[in-house]
Image (cartoon, helix red, strand yellow):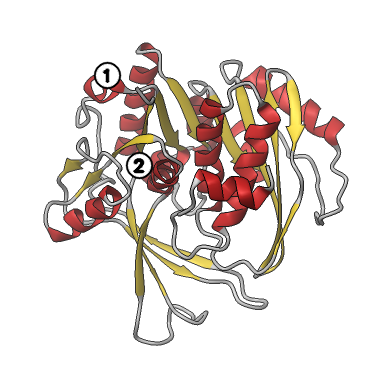
């Protein structure tokens, strides 16, 4: 039977404007469902994997609607808990010209915000599961959601599941009393077999300054010796991790990005080509697309580290061309687009 992957996090309703309008302009908002762990679940399902998604959403039509959105991709949402008052939302203002993108969160008091240990029967959920995926965002939402996340990873470790973790540091979310992003993310990563993050996220979680990169271009020659030393230190800090990934991105303009990635695999460091991406249609979910593609590739081409990394970056590159949070591409499309 196909191995099952379970992801855990908050599904959100994303509100945005047409034609690069600011949030204060116009009267019409467009809504899309998303959220990092839901994005990963959809990408995995599109790639042909067997996926379950766990969250907490309100009863009623809004909760029904977001679960139906996931069901249409074949995702098992039978373990989603219903309760609480409302669905979390965020407002996204697209970058344009010299203006940077912006995000305004409205998640406090959401159904997932009040998630807590004991709400999710993890032993039952994991009974037919091989891989559990979580991210640092769940720990940034609230202390009770943090406690529920650690309950999940401890159960997953006890049951012998592989644990994948996206650091996913969101500085605007760590607002609750006692929140400590470095301490919490570092502890979460101690449980993880695969760890994903960009340079800034690795620095926050590890406390080790990132490798200076400057403005990366398509012909940039990365300092691989410096990155090898960096990952040697990461392996010392996170000895349980077997595979560690770092995404590197330079935003030349709002619609022109440069993207590459590194993979530490069993003591060796791999890199993939640098993609020059223009035009960027929607950058939301690009990291989630990479994470999902790597989880998929690591199962399908186990041991072929270079192929797994190349496939993952090709999938991430494709997400820039798709509106919304979900990377709606198949394995065949990723292979064709990346000339793999």
Helix, strand or loop under label 1: helix
Q: Is residue 214 left or right of residue 26?
A: right
Q: Which quadrant: the N terminus?
A: top left
Q: Give the crowd class for mark 1: few <14, some 14-19, many >=20 residues within 10 Å.
A: few
> Alpha carbon of mark 1 to alpha carbon of mark 2: how far?
19 Å
Name the residue nearer the viewer: 41 or 49: 49
Q: Position of residue 40 (x, y in %)?
A: 44, 43
Name the residue rendered at 42%, 39% in the picture.
48
- Residue 32, placed above or below residue 262: below
Q: Counting residues from the N terminus, which is met first, the one under dot 1 or under dot 2?
A: 2
Tell me if I can see residue 338 in this picture: yes
Name the residue rendered at 56%, 63% in the picture.
321
Q: Which residue is mark 2?
A: 9
- Residue 198, placed above or below residue 307: below
Q: Which residue is mark 1?
A: 127
Name the residue rendered at 27%, 19% in the picture.
127
Total marks shown come to 2
- Residue 104, placed above or below residue 29: above
Name the residue nearer the viewer: 267 or 90: 267
Q: Position of residue 254 (x, y in %)?
A: 65, 70
Q: Position of residue 68 (x, y in %)?
A: 23, 53
The quarter of the displayed image where residue 226 is located: top right
The quarter of the displayed image where residue 231 is located: top right
- Residue 265, placed above or below residue 291: above
Helix, strand or loop under label 2: loop
Whether label 1 touches label 2, CB < 8 Å: no
Residue most extreme to the left: 60
């Amino acid at each position: 039977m196909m191995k099952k992957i379970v992801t855990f996090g908050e599904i959100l309703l994303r509100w945005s404007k047409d034609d690069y309008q600011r949030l204060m302009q116009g009267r019409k908002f467009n809504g899309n469902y998303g959220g990092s762990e839901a994005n990963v679940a959809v990408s995995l399902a599109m790639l042909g994997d067997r996926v379950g998604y766990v969250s907490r959403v309100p009863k009623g039509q809004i909760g029904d609607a977001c679960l139906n959105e996931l069901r249409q991709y074949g995702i098992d949402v039978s373990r989603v808990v219903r309760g609480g008052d409302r669905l979390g939302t965020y407002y996204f203002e697209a970058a344009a010209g010299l203006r940077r993108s912006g995000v305004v969160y409205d998640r406090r008091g959401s159904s997932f915000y009040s998630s807590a240990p004991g709400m999710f029967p993890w032993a039952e959920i994991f009974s037919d599961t091989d891989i559990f995926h979580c991210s640092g965002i769940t720990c940034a939402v609230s202390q009770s959601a943090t406690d529920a996340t650690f309950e999940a990873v401890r159960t997953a470790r006890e049951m012998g599941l592989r644990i994948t973790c996206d650091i996913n540091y969101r500085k605007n979310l760590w607002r609750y009393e006692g929140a400590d992003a470095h301490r919490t993310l570092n502890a979460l990563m101690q449980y993880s077999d695969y760890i994903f993050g960009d340079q800034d996220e690795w620095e926050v979680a590890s406390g080790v300054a990132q490798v200076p990169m400057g403005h990366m271009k398509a012909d940039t020659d990365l300092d691989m010796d410096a990155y090898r030393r960096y990952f040697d230190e990461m392996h010392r800090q996170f000895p349980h991790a077997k595979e560690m990934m770092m995404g590197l991105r330079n935003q030349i303009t709002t619609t022109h990005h440069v993207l590459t990635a590194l993979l530490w695999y069993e003591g060796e460091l791999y890199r993939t080509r640098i993609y020059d991406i223009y035009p960027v249609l929607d950058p939301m979910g690009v990291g989630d697309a990479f994470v999902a593609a790597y989880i998929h590739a690591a199962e399908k081409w186990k041991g072929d580290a270079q192929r797994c990394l190349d496939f993952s970056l090709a999938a991430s590159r494709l997400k820039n061309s798709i509106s919304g949070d979900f990377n709606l591409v198949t394995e065949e499309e990723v292979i064709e687009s990346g000339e793999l």
